[in-house]
Image (cartoon, grey):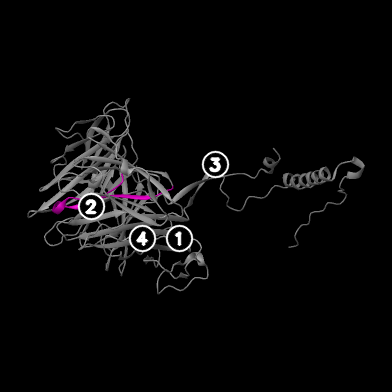
């Protein structure tokens, strides 16, 4: 079809000489005339909305890039660390890649490394944006199938940065799992890696007894960062001059040994603040031969905190550490989610935390041996005080033990995934319906990293109740698999996964919360208004 042409017959520029204008004024006037013509036509003939355009104030679209940062592995002489990547299927985007690299200083003047296919078996892409960097330590071959590989050995191993783009970005999950057999730091340590940020809260740290805790800082950005560590103890804020103004150059990692900063403090809360730049942050706890794990970052301080994944049965113990970092005391109501809903455990009805301080409570047999979740909320709804909270859980068997830390977590409203899961009953899922309505949840295990067929199971959860179940093994599973939790109906769900990998008679385990993957973002809908350029 012949394109329409725009005719301007009869349109003449004004006689600038007759108006007596200067050359500058002439140019401005001529430009104004041309703009008037162009925008006059635009107003008369506005652009047509594309077919299927969304009307309304906003629309939802999938994210196109997801970046996660993992801390340096704390693995001693006997430890080994596995890094895992996974993107759940179901997205509409195509192309892109998912890959993980060691964080290292880069020369900005150097040419970027040549790109390589996401896997040896994948055909090279003609689009450079669809191929993983050639120095990737681990790279996904396709969406829906996880991949795992080893980290560098030794405690000098750097942090890592993982990037998912295009079809690999929505729901991109990255896990790091370390096994240590040495008596100092014995245990299984797992962490679900998170994006860089400017603020992280941790509670449950310690420098008492045999505890050797580290704060890990990783600057995976292209600019430097300056970081402060703020400490809170049972008597209030603790000034540590050596923990202020920590400088991290781009592409560097730093591990700070807490006993060298603070002596004999049993219960601590830590606020990691980047005053400039952004960093990845982690807290690793090792309690001699009693166990070790990563202490996950808490949800931001809030009046109500829900801690999923709680299970205190025979031979287990738990300790709650709560901090009220603000200027007000916190009077908290304690509730536990059981199989029938929320209840108040006898003897643990309330907890009082003074402003700027930390309080610890032993929670023996609080869940009556059943899986559950812990909820801390204001005793007086009219007086909400922001808090952060963590629970340490110890499992003991035949005189040997391991420890894991659970923390306040935001619930899943749509979907969340974890990358590193094992079959044969090693992975257990805890699901808590946090709202007032019953919830239906779909738990999906992906294909294995080396073979297998995905499988799903729907789970009904009564209001306020907790259900636990073994993660369904993929048929013909070979290798590790990705785990995805989706809300099908009802309200939000707080979720966690326990990974149990006994080794040398030690009941090694770790527990990670499953966060909402925020795989979609809301994009405002804007109508064209050329007149805005004339205001």
In the image, is residue 220 above or below residue 359? Answer: below
- The residue that disc 4 covers is 86
86 vs 525, nearest the viewer: 86
Near-viewer residue (291 or 127): 291
Task: Measure the C-alpha gap from mark 2 to mark 4.
Answer: 22 Å
Q: Is residue 67 above or below residue 378?
A: below
Label 3: which secondary element: loop
Query: Which one is closest to the eye, mark 2 or mark 3?
Result: 2
- Of labels 4 and 3, earlier in sequence is 3
How many other residues sit within 10 Å of disc 4, few (<14), some (14-19) or many (≥20)? many
- The alpha-carbon separation of the residues under discs 2 and 3 comes to 45 Å
Chain part drawn in magenta: 277-297
Quarter where residue 364 is shown: top left
Residue under label 3, please give it: 57
Q: Which mark is residue 293?
A: 2
Which one is in front, 28 or 373?
Answer: 28
Q: Secondary structure at mark 1?
A: helix
Q: Earlier in the sequence, mark 1 or mark 2?
A: 1
Q: Is residue 111 left or right of residue 240?
A: right
């Amino acid at each position: 079809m012949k394109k329409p042409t725009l005719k301007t017959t009869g349109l003449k520029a004004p006689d600038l000489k007759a108006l007596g204008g200067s050359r500058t004024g002439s140019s401005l006037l001529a430009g104004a005339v041309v703009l008037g013509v162009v925008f006059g036509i635009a107003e008369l003939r506005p652009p047509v909305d594309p077919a299927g355009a969304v009307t309304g104030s906003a629309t939802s679209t999938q994210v196109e890039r997801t970046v996660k940062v993992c801390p340096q592995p704390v693995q001693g002489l006997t430890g080994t660390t596995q890094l895992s990547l996974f993107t759940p299927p179901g997205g509409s985007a195509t192309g892109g890649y998912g890959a993980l690299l060691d964080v290292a200083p880069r020369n900005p003047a150097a040419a970027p490394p040549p790109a390589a296919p996401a896997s040896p078996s994948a055909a090279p892409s003609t689009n450079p944006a669809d191929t993983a960097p050639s120095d990737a330590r681990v790279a996904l071959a396709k969406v829906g199938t996880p991949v795992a590989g080893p980290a560098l050995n030794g405690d000098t191993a750097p942090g890592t940065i993982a990037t998912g783009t295009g079809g690999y970005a929505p729901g991109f999950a990255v896990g790091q799992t370390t096994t240590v057999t040495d008596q100092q730091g014995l245990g299984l340590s797992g962490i679900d890696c998170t994006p860089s940020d400017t603020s992280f809260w941790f509670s449950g740290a310690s420098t008492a007894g045999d505890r050797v805790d580290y704060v890990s800082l990783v600057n995976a950005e292209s600019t430097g960062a300056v970081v402060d560590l703020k400490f809170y103890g049972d008597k209030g804020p603790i000034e540590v001059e050596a923990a202020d103004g920590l400088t991290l150059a781009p592409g560097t990692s730093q591990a700070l040994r807490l006993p060298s900063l603070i002596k004999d403090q049993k219960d601590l809360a830590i606020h990691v603040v980047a005053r400039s730049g952004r960093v990845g942050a982690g807290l690793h706890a090792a309690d001699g031969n009693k166990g070790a794990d990563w202490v996950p970052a808490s949800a931001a301080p809030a009046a109500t905190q829900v801690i999923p994944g709680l299970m205190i049965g025979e031979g287990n113990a738990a300790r709650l550490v709560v901090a009220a970092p603000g200027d007000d005391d916190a009077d908290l109501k304690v509730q536990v989610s059981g199989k029938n809903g929320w209840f108040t455990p006898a003897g643990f009805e309330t907890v009082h935390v003074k402003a700027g301080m930390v309080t610890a409570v032993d929670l023996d047999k609080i869940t009556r041996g059943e899986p559950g979740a812990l909820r801390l909320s204001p005793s007086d709804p009219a007086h909400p005080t922001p808090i952060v909270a963590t629970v340490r859980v110890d499992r003991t068997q035949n005189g040997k033990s391991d420890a894991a830390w659970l923390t306040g977590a935001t619930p899943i409203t749509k979907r969340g995934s974890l990358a590193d899961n094992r079959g044969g009953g090693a992975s257990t899922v805890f699901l808590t319906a946090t709202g007032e309505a019953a919830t239906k949840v779909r738990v999906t295990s992906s294909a294995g990293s080396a073979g297998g067929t995905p499988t799903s199971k729907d789970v009904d959860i009564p209001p306020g109740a907790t259900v636990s179940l073994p993660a369904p093994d993929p048929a013909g599973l070979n290798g590790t698999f990705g785990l995805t939790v989706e809300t099908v109906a009802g309200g939000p769900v707080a979720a966690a996964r326990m990974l149990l990998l006994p080794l040398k008679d030690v009941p090694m385990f770790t527990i990670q919360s499953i966060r909402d993957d925020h795989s979609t973002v809301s994009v405002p809908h804007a109508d064209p208004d050329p007149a805005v350029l004339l205001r």
